[in-house]
Image (cartoon, coloured by chain):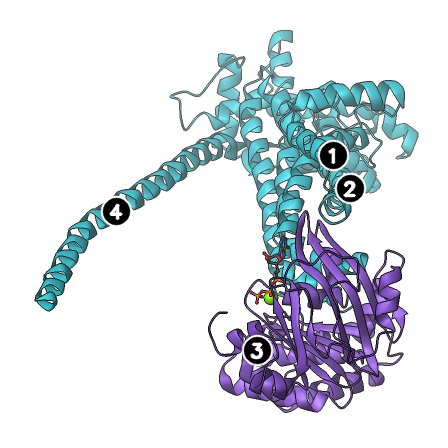
Amino acid sequence: MTKSHALRNQEKVRSRIEQNLKRRYRKEKIFRGFGIASIVFGLLCVAVLLTDIIYKGHGAFFQHYLQLEVQYDPETLGIEQVDESALALANFDGVIKDAMKARFPEARDRRARRELYSIPSTDAPFALRDRLQQAPQLLGERETIWVMVDDDVDAFIKSLDEIEGGFRGRVSERKAGWLMSLYESGELQNRFNTQFFTSGDSREPEQAGIKAALVGSALTLLVTLALSFPIGVAAAVYLEEFAPKNRWTDLIEVNINNLAAVPSIVFGLLGLAIFINFFELPRSAPLIGGLVLTLMTLPTIIISSRAAIKAVPPSIREAAMGMGASRIQVVFHHVLPLAMPGMLTGAIIGLAQALGETAPLLMIGMVAFIVDVPTGITDPATVLPVQIFLWADSPERAFIEKTSAAIMVLLAFLITMNLGAVWLRKKLERRW
Amino acid sequence: MNSIATAVSMPETAVQEGTDVDHKIEYPATTVGAPFVDKAKLRMRGIDVFYGDKQAIHNVSLDIGQHEVVAMIGPSGCGKSTFLRCLNRMNDTIEGCRVSGDIQLDGEQINGASVDVVPLRARVGMVFQKPNPFPKTIYENVAYGPRIHGLASRRAELDEIVETSLTRAGLWNEVKDRLDQPGTGLSGGQQQRLCIARAIAVSPEVILMDEPCSALDPIATARIEELISELRENFTIAIVTHSMQQAARVSQRTAYFHLGNLVEVNDTERVFTNPEHALTEAYITGRFG
Ligand SMILES: Nc1ncnc2c1ncn2[C@@H]1O[C@H](COP(=O)(O)OP(=O)(O)OP(=O)(O)O)[C@@H](O)[C@H]1O
Ligand SMILES: [Mg+2]
């Protein structure tokens, strides 16, 4: 009797499990669907963003150059021999103008001449000077060289593929005609724009480069890393391993968590008040930028480092202490090596935030127009996101593609940094 | 402290009287059997341990003799681990844990805020319940203690320490070709023997073992028991175990704990054949625990 009862019971249980099984699987499927959908959505957003940026910005990596037949005529230049002082005073502008005049003799009146002269970039005379400085024997000789064209010209030629007749903007009909003839005869060529990577900002879009901002960002991040990582790790180690657990440490913990959520501009104001007004450090410099960003990233690094330290198994600590290791030895021999990958992840997240930060840097003057590439942490500098902000704010059409190009450089910087972090973590983790 | 001082000079066979010390003991009032010996390596008198307000060990007094294996048995939660951890001050690392009483190693007080735990733990080593090798190479695991205590001045010396320790722990032949591989990659039993090798590498005088075989299969257990018997020639060993067979096999004396009290201490054979206290008998006959 009891046996058949038990059997019936088992059957009932089994059928119930089966019923529930379907429901369980359905739930699982729905959940998985949600997960996949959100990942697809995220990827789509990234893809749209990237294609838009690349589409808009790829042009900035190329620049049109104009073929010119120039004569380094001592008379036009107004110099007799090639030396430092003579080169500084020499009239290279005249040489360019002569070459343009010779190419388009039909331009006679003043307005036509002015339009003609505006085809090469204002950088062209400097390119000639550099050339002559390198090869002094060219004085009095003729030569065919390639010089950069003005941004309006560049934008016009680049737009030929997209707009019927090209984007004219400030380019007159007559000038457009000259440009077309140059373009068709192959005297205007699209070339890789090395200057974009080798020079600083400029009012002339065709001469504006990213290097100053890139170096500024690198220096600022270097200062940030050098300060925030050791300080953050030391603070985390002290709080986790040595500090007594009492009301004071609770208070400190609450405050650190609060600091992580403080708007970054507040740190900028703080930096302005303390580092510039009180300590009178040089403004607009990576040093101060780094200090301010250190303040900003410290909470992130401390919080993630503490989490990493907490995740070290207590059995390892116990084993080390049981061997007679002092607390410092336990920390340095066991806890830190095991927590290092997690700490690095936190530091990289903090630095990535810092890399993209603009607001606090505006407060300490890193928004200034900086042409020279900074050579040290006390030179005036700007950083990539601020450069993007400045270019996005500029009216010239050519700055649109520069802005997108700068964003690409920023993303590349970020990806390099993250790859470096992943590599470092892998390397450290391999030591278990 | 005064009453403890008198307790230290008590004759070793005397059964501790409840009135002899001024700690309040509700139950059981005394430790029966022979808690004290002549040539004690470790002398403990009137040990009380508190976790916060909760008392985990009540007025325990016990001697552990030179080159002797003392087994500690008792139901789960009775305070064996807590007591064992007093002997190398590992309880210091637990927040809110307080140990009072008199603990002497070779007549030297080791319980007190002024005592440096670093050299103490080099003299009193510990093997834990769960094998916990460092996430480093096998070599580094064993070399760690000698390194931090500065026991070897040259690499060759260190190599020798590592080899002898691993040999003594019965692990050398299994790992000699892969000393540079992670200690965490060994099997559970090998890991525990590695931990023993690590502990004996600094030549401690006493080794504390807290259920060293609880995570191991019978073969690995047998190896470690064999090892304990060999180690007894050079070391004094206190071992906590849940296996009465193990206690019977490896120990000379056995201490039975119950609810934070030390109920009975006697020769191992006596405890398992003819226990003095009713609680001990109940435990070894399997009526609880
Ligand atoms: N860290 C701690 N904090 C608070 N109470 C603790 C702590 N560790 C142990 N205790 C308590 O102290 C008592 C003794 O614990 P202990 O770990 O010494 O028992 P045990 O005899 O080793 O048990 P087991 O055989 O299960 O290992 C238990 O009641 C336990 O709850
Ligand atoms: Mg225990």
Q: Is residue B31 above or below residue B161?
A: above
Q: Which mark is residue A231?
A: 2
Q: Which mark is residue A29?
A: 4
Q: Is residue A137 left or right of residue A432?
A: right
Are the two marked residues, 3 and 4, in contact with CB atoms closer than 8 angstroms?
no
Q: Secondary structure at mark 2?
A: helix
N-term-proximal mark, 1 vs 2: 2
Look at label 3 and name its amino acid: Cys
Residue where numbered disc 3 is placed: B213
Q: Chain of mark 3?
A: B
Residue A274 image position (x, y, % from top left) = 83, 22
Q: Secondary structure at mark 4?
A: helix
Residue A167 image position (x, y, % from top left) = 46, 19
Q: Which mark is residue A294?
A: 1
Q: Is residue A400 left or right of residue B116?
A: left
Chain B tint as drawn: purple
Look at label 4 and name its amino acid: Lys
Ligand 2 neighbours mark 3 (CB distance < 8 Å): no
